[in-house]
Amino acid sequence: MDLVKHLYYFTVVAEELHFGNAAVRLGMAQPPLSQRIRRLEEELDVRLFDRSRRQVRLTAAGQALLPEAREIVARVERLRALAERGTDEVLRVGVPPDLGSAVIAALIDGFREADRGVRLAPAEMWSTDQVAGLAAGTLDVGVVRHPVTVPGLSFGPVLVQRPGVVLAESDPLAAGSSVHPADLAGRGLVLFPGEPGLREETLTECRRHGFVPEEVHEAQTLGLVMAGTAIAFGPRVELPGLRWRPLLGDPLNWRISTAWRGEPGPAAEAFGAVAVRVLKENAGMADDGAAPVRRVRTRPATGFLA
Amino acid sequence: MTDFDGLFRAAGVTGFLHAVDLDTGAEVGHGADEPVALASVFKLALLVEFFRQADRGELDAAERVTVMADRRTPGPTGVSAMADDVTLSLRDLAYLMIAVSDNTAADTLIGRVGLAAVNTMLASSGLTRTRVEHDCAGLLASIVEDTGQEEMPTDPAVVARLRVLDPARTNRGTPRETTRLLGMIWRDEAASPESCAWMRRLLGLQVWPHRLASGFPYDDVAVSGKTGTLPTLRNEAGVVEYPDGGRYAVAVFTRSYGTAQNQPRADAVIGTAARIAVERLRGSGG
């Protein structure tokens, strides 16, 4: 006997207090309904309804059991609903925290439009944590800054961002319309934590263009910049106390792409397409072709099997 | 406890390490039993088997061989980089294989010694998780197959599919087994005492200063070792000897998140991590 179903019939009859009306509500004939209530009474070894008079009434036992029966029926319904939602696909995506709320919101909105069947579970993570998550299978798709890799990863189209420099408004360089890296001498530099590939590349380019930071801070916020103790590189910001200026000659080319492990599912592909569009439209990024290709000049100490 | 994870992360790498005091057996480990891709560190095992065969009279270490110019395994150093036929002794090939990680020298020795014999030696020494599957030419062939080019890739997508970086599909070992092998060489257990002394001399002649040795910038400390390098992979295993007689085998295996070939901090963290481990074994610091 399906106890939950029988309890559900019990709650409907108890509400209607009329077998005929209850049967109509349940979309069944009256005799099988009466029979099922009788079977439930046998099962529980208790009389639920008093049918002795012309009117149907709940017995004292029936009254006592009704709230429990309702509770059980409601709980089973909730369980079913949860189970149904659980079978819906969830796409766990990682995005770099510095992309900013507007870009992250546009990613989520864009994906909601593209794929309504899949729930997006975004997490703000730096690239190293993302590639670790992708490798461990705790993340489905990432948006990572290059160069970063672990064995077995695949990447979507690579986009390029040309960061400018963020200065304190009191910095004398804020008076000019653009800044050459060499002008930044004597200042500290704030870089994102958890972006080792980007960090190496950025520091190398800075050195090459005559800027050796006094000190390199790893921080998520621009507090040190606001305080005038360091500068940062990044997209244009409009914040009180800060000034953004383009870097002369665009010495920095920050590359970013989606990443996943193994074969991407349709949801992952849809997210990848949305990410590329949003990063281009909302974060000012361009296709990889815009960045100069760097030819690798090998050295003995870093060559094959050194 | 030393935060090795934090140290490696700050250099943009993940790393595994094992360090052991060769006289007391005291040890420091960080993922010491993780399987790792050896890269050129596999040449250590080849060196040991080469000298064992010499001890048994199966080959003459002083025999002169000619390495033809057209039979070279690519590589940036030693015979691999030379233009013409080269005639030299087997043990001088061993010197080039260790001092400058000469790939042609290694493959020529493998031609004499045999990879099967190297693996038999490893198994009989109890190093069951260390295995040499390929010679240098075989490792390069696998890279060419995976990338379609002979140059070492820096494109993250290409690096991600290299089989030579997957311990299950390449020459492999563990940090702990690597220091065991070094311990055998330093305690005269790997071969005859004369051969072990020869191996120690060759390892002391390694030229690279940027990894293990960079952690011990002291004139009175000797650092011997063998590096291992492949895209994103930087290793070194060696022995550090202090003036008070303390001697420590250290093996550090790292993998960088970034794909640039030149990452001085990733090289240097091998020395820094090794020094912290050794200082802990010596009862000072960390």
Image (cartoon, rainbow, N blue to C red):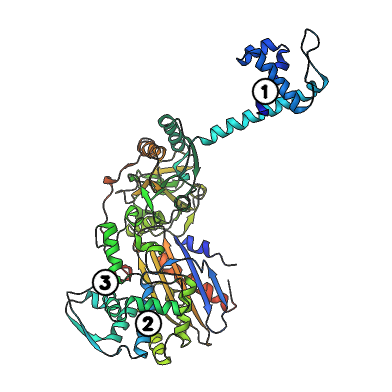
Nearer the observer, B51 or B120: B120
Label whose residue precedes the other's in the sequence (2 or 3): 2
* Residue A49 shows up from this direction: yes
Residue found 24% across the figure and 78% down from its top: B79
Secondary element under disc 3, as helix, strand or loop, is loop
The mark lying in front, picked from 1 and 2, is: 1
Residue B76: which numbered mark, if any? Answer: 3
Q: Amino acid at mark 3?
A: Pro
Q: Which residue is mark 2?
A: B49
Q: Chain of mark 3?
A: B
Left or right: A16 in relation to A220: right
Residue B1, compared with residue B205, is above or below; it is: above
Q: Chain of mark 2?
A: B
Instruction: Mark 2 vs mark 3: tell me if same chain.
Output: yes
Q: Chain of mark 1?
A: A
Give the percent coordinates (x, y) of residue A282.
39, 36
> Badge 2: how crowded within 10 Å, few (<14), some, or many (20+)?
many
Q: Amino acid at mark 2?
A: Glu
Give the percent coordinates (x, y) of residue B96.
30, 81
Q: Which residue is mark 1?
A: A8
Q: Amino acid at mark 1?
A: Tyr
